[in-house]
Structures are given as structure tokens and as C-alpha cells.
Image (tube, rainbow, N blue to C red):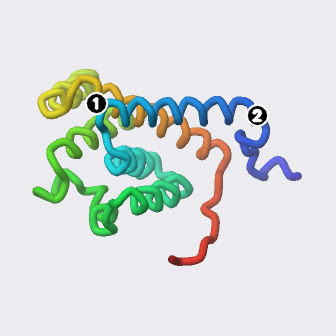
Amino acid sequence: MAVSDPLFLDKTNPELWNSIGKFSNAVAKSYRAAGVSDRTAELVNLRVSQINGRAYCLDLHARKALAAGESLRRINLLRTWDECGGLFSEEECAALAIAEAATDLPKPEERIAAVASARLVLTDEQVAAIQWIAVAMNAFNRISILSRHPVKERELS
């Protein structure tokens, strides 16, 4: 293997990969218990992956979002969610603002404002759960970035 070939972190340290998988499962349990839908969680995962530019994760989570009932139209417009009027609910907009703040890491006052605004329409449990979704997705994106995971060819369905 050439030194320029990808070094897949999930293959070189499967025990660590399995532990982040368990962490992700715990995050899913937490957000569901807080009343956050799988559809909203996948919107957050997609937005984080858009910001991070991860094709592999975008492919995976677009399929998961569709399976969770998301529309292709909203997936296509997700990058511009804040320009789409009523296409995204107030709760979804709050979740997406949290996703962006957790990923872009703007100035502290902007991060604080995003969370404070979200707390006006979501419960504290939901706000915390959405932050954990973004943290987990950012971790997976970093692993994918470092591993250079390729988008796998799939049949169109």
C-alpha cells in the first residue's frame, strides 16, 4: 500500500470505531426521548455534513432522511433553509441554527444567540439533544475527512 493511499480510521482502530458507534446510538436514544424526530436529526446531520463538505456523509444521510420521510425538495434546499420562508418549521429552523453554530463555531455571542433562540421554540432537552446530534455528526465527519471515505456506487432507486 502506498503512503498516499487512504488510511481508514474505522479499519485501523475498530474498537474506537465501535465506541463512536455506541456513542451515536446513545445520542439517537437521547434525541428520541426528548421528542426530536429522526427526520429532524437527519436534517441536522445533512446540514453539518454540507458545511464540512463530506460527500460520503451527505450520500448516507440523504438516504436516511428520505427513509425518515424527508422530501427531496427540502433536501435540495437545505443549504438555503433560512431563505425558504415556511418550508422548514420553526423547530427545524432552530435545530438547523444549532447545527450551524456547532459546526461553524462562530463568535461566542453568535453561538449563545443560536441556542437562546432555539430555547424559545424547543425544550431544553431538545436543544441539548440537537447539540449532541451535531457533536456526533461533526465527529463522524472528521473521521471520514481523515479517512478519505469514498462515496460508494449504488444503484439508483
User: Quick check: can you spot residue 100?
Assistant: no
The residue located at (76%, 34%) in the rendering is 13
Q: In the picture provided, is 25 more to the left or to the right than 68?
A: right
Describe residue 75's horizontal placement relative to residue 150 as left or right: left
- Front residue of this view, candidates 25 and 12: 25
Query: Farthest residue in the right direction?
Result: 1
Q: Is residue 114 left or right of residue 136?
A: left
Tag 1's secondary structure?
A: helix
Residue 61, percent across and down? 47, 54
Label 2, label 1: how far apart the Cα atoms are: 32 Å
Q: Residues within 10 Å of mark 1 (few under 14, many from 20)?
A: many
Name the residue nearer the viewer: 126 or 117: 126
Figure check: 2 above or below 10: below
Going from the N terminus, do you reach mark 2 or mark 1 first?
2
User: Which residue lies at the image location 61% right of the left edge and 72% below the top edge?
Assistant: 154
| Amino acid marked by disc 2 | Asn
Q: Is residue 157 above or below residue 70?
A: below
The amino acid at mark 1 is Gln
Q: Which mark is residue 126?
A: 1
Q: Residues within 10 Å of mark 2 (few under 14, many from 20)?
A: few
Looking at the image, residue 126 lies above or below residue 96: above
Residue 13's label in the rendered image is 2
Residue drawn at (56%, 56%), measured in percent from left and top? 56
Q: Quadrant location of residue 155?
A: bottom right
Residue 4 in view in this figure: yes
Q: Position of residue 77 (x, y in %)?
A: 27, 62
Residue 55, label in figure: none
Viewer-side label of 2, 1: 1
Q: Position of residue 31 (x, y in %)?
A: 37, 34
Q: What residue is drawn where x is 27% and y is 39%?
A: 95
Secondary element under disc 2, as helix, strand or loop, is loop
